[in-house]
Image (cartoon, coloured by chain):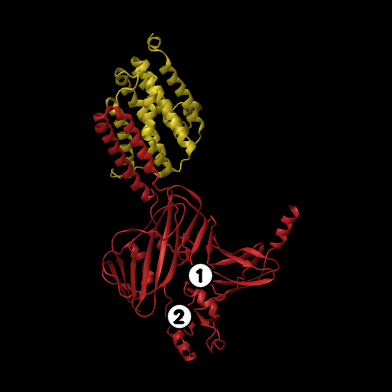
Amino acid sequence: MTASFALVLLLQADPQIEKVERLVGNVNRPLLWMPLKVTLTSASDFSGDVVATSRFGFSVARAVKIKAGGREEVLLPSIAAEEVIAGKTRFKLPGDVVNPDRIVLVDARLPYAGDLVSTEKVLYQRIAPGDLEKTLPRGLLEAADLVLVKEGAGTAAPTRGDAEKAVAAVQERPACLEAVDRGMWTQAPQAGWVPAKRTWALFFVTTYAFAAFVALAVVAKRFPKFGFACVGAVAALGIAGYGVFPRGQAWIVGQSAEVVPTAGEGREHRIWFLQCATEIPAAKVDFPRLVKPIFPTMGGTEDPFVLRVDDRGSSVEGLKILPGRPACFGGSEGWARAKDPEALTGAVVVKGGEVEGSGPLSDEFKAWRRFVGREGRFAVVGRSDRAAGLVQSADLADEHERPPIFIRTLK
Amino acid sequence: MGLPPLHRSAALYLAWIGGLCGGVVLLLANLFPFPLPFATPGAFFGAVVELEIFFVLLIWPFFVPSLLREGCTAPLLLAYVGALLLFALPLVLIAANVSSVDAPGVFRSQVMVAALAALAAGVAARFRAALPWYFLAVFWISATHSFWAFLGQEMGASSPGVSIYLSPFWGAVADRSAPAWVQAALYGLGGVGMLSVPARKAAA
């Protein structure tokens, strides 16, 4: 038994971290996704997590399996990464980063990709086509100002001349969700009751009181022999009703904002606020897309949690939520809309960076203001919240979505 | 000997369930122009148990004489207590769910409510003339001891440490389970003892 246990331990030796590359270059954009390409080797079979710790207090983990003597390249999303850990092996990321004005990612298939020379202002970073395919659609290259590609999503620039024109035309990087956003936190739900539980409890007590009145004042009076049976039946119905009462202590308020430019593909940004009525020491929450935590301050979090990613969605593990201290996560995806939505309310037009008109501005507009840019139109689609079921968690009692935001950028 | 027809005691059940449901509606429905500071999810279970204790200590004794007049014997009053707890069980379960109270906590609170109800029934059944003194004692033990301890906490005055083991409203929401169990044993034994004493002996 002991020998077999030792054999298992021997076979499950820690892998070696051969190399860690920042796909977007050694740049300092700490609030955005900065995916890492981690090369691992292992002398024996390894099955475990590759983890990137963040200076904001959380970690991003991805499961990996390496055959004995094998080599594996893992794309690991990260935000302000400090260290990469695989098993017990640690790799400290170098702190020497540059601060160029522009980051331009260049598809390695482009014939001129090797000829572009970085300057103090513009950093050209080559990216392999496979990495591009895996990262660009998920919004992981948001730190780049421009992604030059041979074909597909990104900016198509088949010749060097096209590339230079595209770089010269870059003005402002489209706004994206950032890991610290105080403005967005003005939208956080207030602490208190789980909305579904409050509504359910009110509905239940009024129905229960009415049923009790009917049973006691009508049925028991008419049929005295069955009086106690009536009481038992009402109580049994009440206990059965409790069976469908929401069990979880957390609820989620979500909101999406669709940002559509005049040309090209739009993006849908979606945020989720997790709030709870009583303390949840370690929640596990599954999101339908890759999300990043959004903190109100640069301090990040004091209670570490793990953001586990795979090829599609992501999940948060070991998340501590306290009443009055919600958590916020957000993610973006490409979005193609055929036509503008109808029934818009609360429209605000921005021209030359200034808001047109003198009316009071909604909190929602203030929160999403930077996504409108210098020229654009902001509007809310519809008026009322609606139930949603995008996020999965055993602790979840209620999820609803605020009316979505529609932003048309004009420049 | 037996329980009277239910419709005769319907007022008791309706008052009980109406009081509890009404209390929950007042807590949850934002009927007041200001938010109730104690109407929080964490305090909801405590509030429902306090409502139960208020009813069994101060309202339930008024129903006891009419039940006895209708032919119910004193020991059978405990059956009424059981029916009251059964009737309130769904509300208690919901409150425990909202406040994340575990099963032992729910059980302890309901045992304590039953014990207090037995005490109130015993006094009302066997010592009806002493009911005014009973209400005075309830007020003294419930309110004065809590206030005394509050003054002790806020102003440094010395207050008896045993108060939490006597005051039902305080013991029911105490962080520790010992006060609730001690009170349940103390008041429950007292109540059952009074109810099991033959009527003539008690009157003598």
Which picture quadrant has residue A87?
Answer: bottom right
| Residue A256 on image: x %, y % | 37, 65
Same-chain check, marks 2 and 1:
yes
How packed mark 1 is, by other alpha carbons closer than 10 Å (few <14, some 14-19, many 20 or more), is many
Q: Amino acid at mark 1?
A: Trp
| Chain B representation colour | yellow
- Quadrant for the C terminus of chain A, please: bottom left
| Residue A150 on image: x %, y % | 49, 85
User: Circle 1 is placed at which residue position?
Assistant: A33
Nearest the viewer among A39 and A215 is A215
Q: Is residue B159 visible?
A: no
Numbered disc 2: what chain? A
Q: Is disc 2 placed on a helix, strand or loop? A: loop
Give the chain ID for the red colour.
Answer: A
Numbered disc 1: what chain? A
| Residue A2 on image: x %, y % | 74, 53
Q: Is residue A17 visible?
A: yes
